[in-house]
Image (cartoon, rainbow, N blue to C red):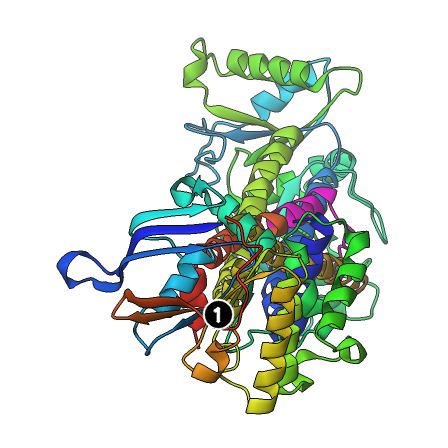
Amino acid sequence: MIELQTVERVYGDGALGMRALQGVSLTVLSGEFVSIMGPSGSGKSTLLHLVSFLDTPTRGTYRFRGRDTATFSDAERAAIRNKEIGFVFQAFNLLGRMSVYENVELPLLYSSLHPEERRAAIEAAVLSVGLTEKLHLKANTLSGGEKQRVAIARALVCKPSIICADEPTGNLDSVSGAQVMEILRRLNEEGHTIILVTHETYTARYGRRLVTMKDGRIASDERVAGHASAGLSK
Amino acid sequence: MRIRDVIQTSWRGITQARARSLLTMLGIVIGITSVILLLSIGTSATKLLLNQVQGIGSNLIFIVPGATKGSRFSSPPSVQGVVVKTLTAQDTDALSREGSVLRTAPEVRGQAKVVFENNDTTVTFEGTTADFFLVRDLEIARGAAFKESDVLSFNRVAVIGGTIAKTLFGERDPVGKTIHQLGKEGIGPFGVDQDNLVIIPITVAQKQLLGIDYYNVLLIQAHPDYNISYVVSRVTSVFRQTHRITDPSKDDFTVRTQEDALSLLGDITSIMTVFLTAVASISLLVGGIGIMNIMLVAVAERTREIGLRKALGANSRDITEQFLLEAVMLTSMGGVVGILLGSSLVVLLYFILSRVLPTGWFFALPPTAIFLAVAVAALTGILFGIYPARQAAKKDPIEALRYE
């Protein structure tokens, strides 16, 4: 469903520009759990931003569900971010003065879901991360692990096919981190495609495919042993 | 994005920064309040002035010696201090034969010091005929007005205004007392406080005080059966005949009616209204710039929120709408508060001024003022909200999310 062909991303102009990605080609099938690893500055976050329509490639082609994304308008890209992709950030990015419910509701404000169906969608998403009893608490009263679970519920609420997570355990202790990773694994088993950026080997092991990056290029791309790769499709 | 969601989101933005929102509104409140207050005062003052002019008498025509050149705002030379001696008894004689003229009252004016016992005051004296009291519709509080026989026999009698009576006689009844006159000064300006006036027979004023044989002004009361503009044209042709003028551009007199004075006044007051509106608009402009300033701060402060909303699927239009609506909501609320505050101040002002001012005060809350205030408030919100909203929508989601 995601096909990148010799994609480059340059920040700034011309010769002085910073080449964050240099000819990256990557195909991700529906239902995969891909972990992207690499040292800081290797381009892994840039790659995730391109895939999740937060950024656009400078050169190369990005085909999403078989369509070339170069011609997509601002509104189309926003709609794909809303419907197809759920994003989980390292810094949670919750609106602290709003309740858990209101935070999870945010993507629905920009979706076409009928307001009467919202409550059910929000409750289902919050239930799947196990925070139902905290539904009406303000986000800034939660612990880090709980905040990240709210963020996952927010990423889930529009029922996206892909979940992009950028260092989701980076700000968490190991117990909370493991909880978050378990949720992501379960979501993958339920059929969501997961693309995870991390620099921790431990976290990366949850994936069924490991992509390592170095200096804006893909250094290795391998199946992780013990995981079945059946049932995948383009 | 649904309208209800946009409204809710914007409302949340406003309520989450309560102090900032209230201060922003204050600018608009002050602007709208001053628009309403100034327009109301302008309207009331206009009514008051018109009322005063209408109080002079009815169907009045004034003849002033000397021609008026230029616009109707320029004054005839006699008013500017030039002595013109062309208005004489010949003219009053001719007018007395004109059927469309009911009464004529010539006037001469001068200034003198009047004395009673130890009290003295400087007054404008007005020499005229007995008809003057009818033409000007003046009421005599005590005693009686002088008669035509007093005028013909040079009787030294005077009708004095209330202010003078108080200055000279205090609480005593001035009727039958003798006042003295010391020295003389030249002809005074037009338009004096009516209560500070001494009216004496024109013969005394002309021959014994001023030593002249011309008039300063002729007051004509038109016959009520005739249209005032017809009377004006009749009077004009009578004057041209007596003064032997064949070329209208060489007129040596100026005919003015009460309507002229009223319309001149109307011009002055509408200029005043424009001026007041301009002043009020400036305060609204300042309020608007305040809104823009605060909205820009809000946009900068909420950069991460904007980035997040974009990452979650908001497009540029959603963000623009949210921030524009915030600005419009702030100005609208400020507008409502301003209208309420302005209207209450207008009512308060009416109660105070109608008691304090001797002339009274008119209550005026013109609907145009309220309409203007609402329109301007909404426009201010949109105008000064667009720029910050566009700044917000232009933000790149990744950079916005990295913003600390």
- Mark 1 belongs to chain: A
Left or right: B167 with respect to A188?
right
Tell me: residue B17, above or below residue B208.
below
Q: Residue furthest top?
A: B246
Q: Residues within 10 Å of mark 1 (few under 14, many from 20)?
A: many
Give the labeled residue for mark 1. A196
Left or right: A5 with respect to B326?
left
The magenta region covers B356-376
Tell me: residue B289, above or below residue B245.
below
Left or right: A193 with respect to B143?
left
Could you say where residue B73 lies in the image, as x and y percent from the top left?
A: 48, 35
Residue B148 appearing in the image: yes
Residue at (73%, 52%) from the top-left corner? B4
Residue at (25%, 70%) from the top-left corner? A215
User: Which image quadrant: the C terminus of chain B?
Assistant: bottom left
Q: Amino acid at mark 1?
A: Leu
